[in-house]
């Protein structure tokens, strides 16, 4: 419903501040990320904004890293080595960035090797400047009492299309539904709200939006609310 | 705040009264008198006290009101009065209406609410009339693909069947519309109509929720009819008759509930199921199937079904009273009518007012026994209805499988126990024809 | 690391709903497309007295449900999109709209997350006020839920009593916050207003009466033989399935898993209070419906403890700068235990006054996943009880 003329007008003022803020944050951290950079094959993975502030922290004061959380991330890094990137380690929260080729294997290891058993939340985050849409899984555990406080934040990124055709463009990710049942409705929601098609998900229908919704996926940044 | 009566003027008040009187008189003269003439001259008139009720006699009755009494007496003994007014339809509707009102107030008290409050000034007594007017004024919507004749007929048939049921109930000695020897069998036959009407209405609506509701009603009524009939067999055995008046009269000493409590309990439970009352209101289960078989009914069609179901409620409660609680029997509490008013008249100083025709009316029709019987009957019926309504405040709805399980296994088993008890009592010579009691 | 279950908390039913994951295995929602002659499709909702603001596409074979496909979204309001256009303070009133009668709890994770993003330390007294408000709100929500559960089962008294008794706590919240339902009371840095004078006494009195009152519900509702016969062993969610489906709150605890965010990951001052998270092992609709009621009794206890331990005076809010903003790119995920279960809020900040992305991970949405699995094979008469025992609030699921 937002016409083509409206979109650029709305997006532009927003884009600018983000680009302003980005180099500021990015520049000093490029170096720390380069340590893990050879690990990452994808060019999209480089500017993972998630990692920046967090990787910075351990460098400045490495003492603050909580031990238990560090051990969890260590296990993943030990298993997958270069394929994963530790985005951040905070109290009770461990962030892992994975490329979309490896997300399925990493999730399987998280379930079988680390005893995480359910996904609390699946969120999409749109990064128009980086031409990517991040999908963030917040994974928790019911069975393991030591993990009750923990949330593992597994983040992966899909390619973003300027003119999305949900379901039949390059914005695709492997589904995690065969690993965690609980993502079933969450992934359906991401599909309709961001246009990220989950390959292998058996039920890629609309969930919340009406059947006749023919506009952009509404939570993308280029879909603007009228009057704002 | 707006003021309801801004300024009250006595002159205005008197003027409004006079206006009312004027209009009443005018309408009476313009409509009432011609109507009387038409009735008296056109319609064949009954024979009263050996002479035909001619227009002359009728006008004489207007002059001397005591001459109306034979006419009233004659009217009270007609069939039309019995069917329309006293033991029949009018009485039942009045009782049912008061039952609805009592139910709503009682439920409100249980649920810490107020209930009907505004309509009719006093505790909302006219709420029911308001609801009825609302239903009449509503549009009747028929589903496009409904089988229209059957769909229209079903509510009417429902009320008619309920009224037929009411006609079989003896209210006081001799006061019954249809005093037939196979009265109880007639009751069973009439009850058998309800599931058919329900499924006809549900099927003809051509809609999903009514269909499910109709099927549920069919299941429920058919499976509960068997324990219903079996539970009454005990009473038939000990009385040896199917005539409801005779069953009622046979309980002058003891109501049968003392000897056959199991039968009474089973009959009460089946009654709840037949009436679709909570906890057995599955055919109208709101949260599952909207309103069940009533979903597509609108306006006064819905009102008719409601009327029919409340008539049915009255009739079942009355049947319980007749069969188990002794019908009209009860201690004589109505005082005898002072005889000297009939024989000598009322002395008011120098004038003695004698009312002719009062004697036959009071001796033949409105007797002391009749009033007493009616009083006890109404009291007992109201009590039974209270217990029918009470579960609505404390029970949730049961599920279909639990309901059918209850009907087909537990209740039928209890019925046979009841029958054995009745047989034992009869063969032991305790009760029954020629028994001790 | 896997903990073996003690044998006594294994669920009573051995019915396992979910098989091993396989590629050709379809979710029950998709089984709808295979239509048989005998099968009738019912659209339960959105205009149905037993559906709420959603649609359940139910297929029945006789009286048995063969497939159920929930179709939420009728009250989708795009709260997450709206949040990207408002700053951290103006987001407060509209974020509580999805569950207005649990409005403190749905704001709680958001406020906690914003406090972490902005680096605000909350005064001690404010934390206690928040806990009291959140527990009162939990009771208010559960009373509303219980009322609807009552009328879904055809128990009209159970509709009227909780609706009436809920007013006690609503009055209390009105005294505390100034609004009956949409309080907007929690703000980053504390709560909006201090408690009124003599609130402690009034609160204690009302809560004590409330507790006495809800204990009476057992006689009319929870011990009712018809209710028990109707809801026991219906819609059984086994322990394994509860874990796999990732359900939360009372649904999870009814299946024998002791998981309460207040206890496992205490926020604010919950670690100083004695919380018993109620667990039942049956996993049926009866257990699921009884746990919220027991939760309310527990909440009354927590409120009394909090009233006792609360500092009697002190500030309840930190003065914020106008238009507060985070320090560069940061993400935060906070969760609390709401009336329905664990409620998470994921905030992505890019250093601007508005959140770059805000996601509410609501318990209703997570519990909805279990509905098709539970309804499959049940009788139609069990649909309302199973559906509403999931502690599901359609407006919250749609957001």
Image (cartoon, coloured by chain):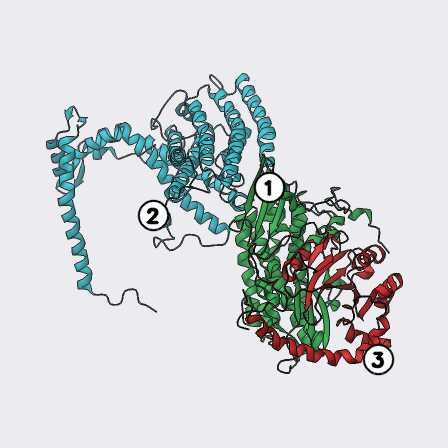
* Depth order, front residue of C168/C24: C24
Q: Quadrant of the N terminus of chain B?
A: bottom left
For label 1, the residue is: C59
Q: Chain of mark 2?
A: B
Which tint was used for chain B? cyan
Q: Chain of mark 3?
A: A
Q: Write the residue at 67% across / 70% down.
A: A128
* Depth order, front residue of A145/C156: A145
Q: Position of residue C357 (x, y in %)?
A: 66, 69
For label 3, the residue is: A60
Based on the displayed image, in which of its 4 quarters is residue A75 positioned?
Answer: bottom right
Q: Which mark is residue B137?
A: 2
Which tint was used for chain A? red
Badge 1: how crowded within 10 Å, few (<14), some, or many (20+)? many
**Which chain comes out green in the rendered image?**
C
Callout 1 touching callout 3 (CB < 8 Å): no
Q: Is residue B392 above or below residue A169?
A: above
Tag 2 and tag 1 share a subunit: no
Tag 1 and tag 3 share a subunit: no
Q: Is residue C108 above or below residue B148?
A: below
């Amino acid at each position: 419903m937002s016409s083509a003329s409206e979109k650029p007008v709305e997006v532009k003022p927003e884009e600018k501040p983000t680009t302003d803020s980005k180099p500021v944050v990015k520049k000093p951290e490029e170096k720390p990320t380069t340590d893990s950079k050879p690990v990452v094959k994808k060019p999209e993975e480089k500017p993972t904004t998630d990692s920046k502030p967090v990787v910075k922290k351990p460098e400045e004061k490495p003492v603050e890293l909580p031990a238990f959380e560090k051990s969890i991330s260590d296990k993943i890094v030990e298993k997958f080595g270069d394929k994963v990137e530790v985005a951040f380690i905070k109290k009770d929260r461990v962030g892992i960035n994975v490329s979309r080729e490896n997300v399925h294997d990493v999730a399987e290891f998280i379930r079988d090797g680390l005893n995480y058993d359910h996904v609390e939340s699946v969120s999409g985050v749109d990064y128009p400047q980086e031409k990517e849409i991040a999908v963030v899984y917040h994974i928790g555990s019911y069975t393991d009492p030591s993990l009750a406080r923990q949330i593992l934040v597994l983040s992966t990124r899909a390619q973003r299309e300027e003119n999305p055709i949900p379901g039949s463009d390059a914005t695709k990710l492997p589904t995690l539904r065969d690993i965690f049942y609980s993502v079933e409705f969450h992934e359906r929601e991401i599909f309709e709200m961001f246009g990220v098609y989950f390959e292998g998900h058996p039920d890629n229908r609309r969930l919340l939006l009406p059947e006749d919704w023919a506009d952009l996926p509404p939570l993308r940044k280029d879909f603007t609310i009228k009057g704002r | 705040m707006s003021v309801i009566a801004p300024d009250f003027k006595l002159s205005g008040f008197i003027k409004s009264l006079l206006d009312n009187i004027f209009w009443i008189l005018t309408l009476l003269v313009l409509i009432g008198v011609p109507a009387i003439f038409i009735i008296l001259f056109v319609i064949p008139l009954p024979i009263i006290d050996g002479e035909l009720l001619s227009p002359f006699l009728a006008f004489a009755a207007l002059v001397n009101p005591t001459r109306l009494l034979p006419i009233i007496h004659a009217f009270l003994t007609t069939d039309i009065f019995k069917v329309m007014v006293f033991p029949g339809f009018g009485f039942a509707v009045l009782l049912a209406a008061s039952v609805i009102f009592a139910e709503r107030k009682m439920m409100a008290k249980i649920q810490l609410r107020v209930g009907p409050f505004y309509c009719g000034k006093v505790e909302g007594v006219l709420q029911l009339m308001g609801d009825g007017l609302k239903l009449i004024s509503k549009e009747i919507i028929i589903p496009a693909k409904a089988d229209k004749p059957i769909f229209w007929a079903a509510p009417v048939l429902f009320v008619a069947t309920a009224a037929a049921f009411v006609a079989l109930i003896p209210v006081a000695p001799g006061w019954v519309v249809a005093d037939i020897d196979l009265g109880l069998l007639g009751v069973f036959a009439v009850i058998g109509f309800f599931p058919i009407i329900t499924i006809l209405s549900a099927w003809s609506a051509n809609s999903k929720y009514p269909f499910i509701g109709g099927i549920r009603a069919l299941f429920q009524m058919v499976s509960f009819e068997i324990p219903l009939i079996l539970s009454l067999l005990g009473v038939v055995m000990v009385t040896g008759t199917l005539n409801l008046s005779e069953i009622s009269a046979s309980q002058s000493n003891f109501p049968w509930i003392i000897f056959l409590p199991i039968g009474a309990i089973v009959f009460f439970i089946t009654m709840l199921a037949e009436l679709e009352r909570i906890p057995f209101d599955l055919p109208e289960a709101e949260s599952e199937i909207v309103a069940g078989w009533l979903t597509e009914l609108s306006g006064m069609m819905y009102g008719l079904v409601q009327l029919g179901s409340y008539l049915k409620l009255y009739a079942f409660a009355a049947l319980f009273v007749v069969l188990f609680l002794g019908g009209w029997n009860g201690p004589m509490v109505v005082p005898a009518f002072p005889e000297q008013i009939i024989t000598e008249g009322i002395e008011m100083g120098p004038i003695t007012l004698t009312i002719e025709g009062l004697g036959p009316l009071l001796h033949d029709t409105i007797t002391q026994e009749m009033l007493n019987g009616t009083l006890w009957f109404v009291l007992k019926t109201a009590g039974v209805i209270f217990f029918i309504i009470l579960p609505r405040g404390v029970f949730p709805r049961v599920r279909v499988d639990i309901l059918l399980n209850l009907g087909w296994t537990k209740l039928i088993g209890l019925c046979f126990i009841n029958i054995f008890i009745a047989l034992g009592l009869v063969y032991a010579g305790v009760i029954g024809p020629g028994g001790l009691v | 690391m896997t903990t073996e279950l003690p044998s006594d908390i294994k669920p009573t039913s051995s019915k396992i709903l979910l098989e091993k994951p396989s590629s050709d295995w379809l979710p029950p929602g998709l089984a709808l497309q295979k239509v048989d002659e005998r099968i009738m499709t019912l659209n339960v909702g959105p205009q149905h007295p037993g559906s709420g603001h959603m649609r359940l596409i139910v297929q029945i074979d006789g009286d048995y449900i063969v497939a159920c496909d929930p179709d939420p979204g009728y009250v989708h309001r795009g709260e997450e999109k709206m949040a990207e256009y408002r700053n951290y303070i103006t987001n407060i009133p509209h974020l509580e709209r999805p569950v207005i009668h649990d409005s403190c709890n749905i704001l709680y994770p958001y406020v906690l997350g914003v406090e972490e993003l902005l680096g605000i330390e909350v005064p001690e007294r404010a934390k206690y006020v928040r806990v009291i408000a959140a527990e009162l709100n939990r009771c208010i929500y559960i009373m509303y839920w219980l009322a609807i559960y009552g009328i879904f089962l055809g128990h009209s008294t159970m509709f009227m009593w909780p609706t009436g008794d809920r007013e006690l706590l609503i009055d209390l919240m009105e005294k505390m916050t100034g609004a009956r339902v949409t309080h907007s009371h929690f703000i980053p840095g504390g709560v909006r207003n201090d408690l009124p004078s003599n609130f402690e006494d009034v609160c204690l009195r009302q809560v004590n009466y409330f507790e006495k009152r809800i204990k009476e519900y057992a006689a009319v509702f929870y011990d009712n033989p018809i209710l028990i016969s109707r809801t026991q062993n219906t819609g059984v969610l086994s322990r394994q399935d509860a874990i796999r489906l990732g359900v939360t709150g009372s649904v999870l605890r009814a299946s024998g898993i002791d998981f309460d965010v207040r206890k496992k990951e205490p926020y604010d001052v919950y670690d100083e209070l004695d919380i018993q998270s109620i667990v039942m092992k049956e996993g049926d609709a009866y257990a699921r419906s009884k746990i919220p009621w027991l939760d309310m009794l527990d909440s009354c206890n927590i409120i009394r403890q909090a009233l006792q331990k609360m500092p009697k005076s002190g500030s309840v809010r930190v003065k914020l700068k106008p238009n507060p903003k985070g320090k560069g790119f940061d993400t935060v995920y906070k969760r609390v235990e709401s009336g329905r279960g664990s409620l998470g809020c994921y905030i992505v900040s890019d250093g601007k006054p508005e959140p770059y992305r805000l996601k509410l991970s609501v318990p209703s949405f997570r519990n909805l996943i279990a509905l098709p699995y539970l309804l499959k094979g049940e009788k139609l008469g069990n649909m309302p009880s199973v559906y509403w025992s999931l502690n599901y609030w359609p407006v919250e699921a749609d957001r």
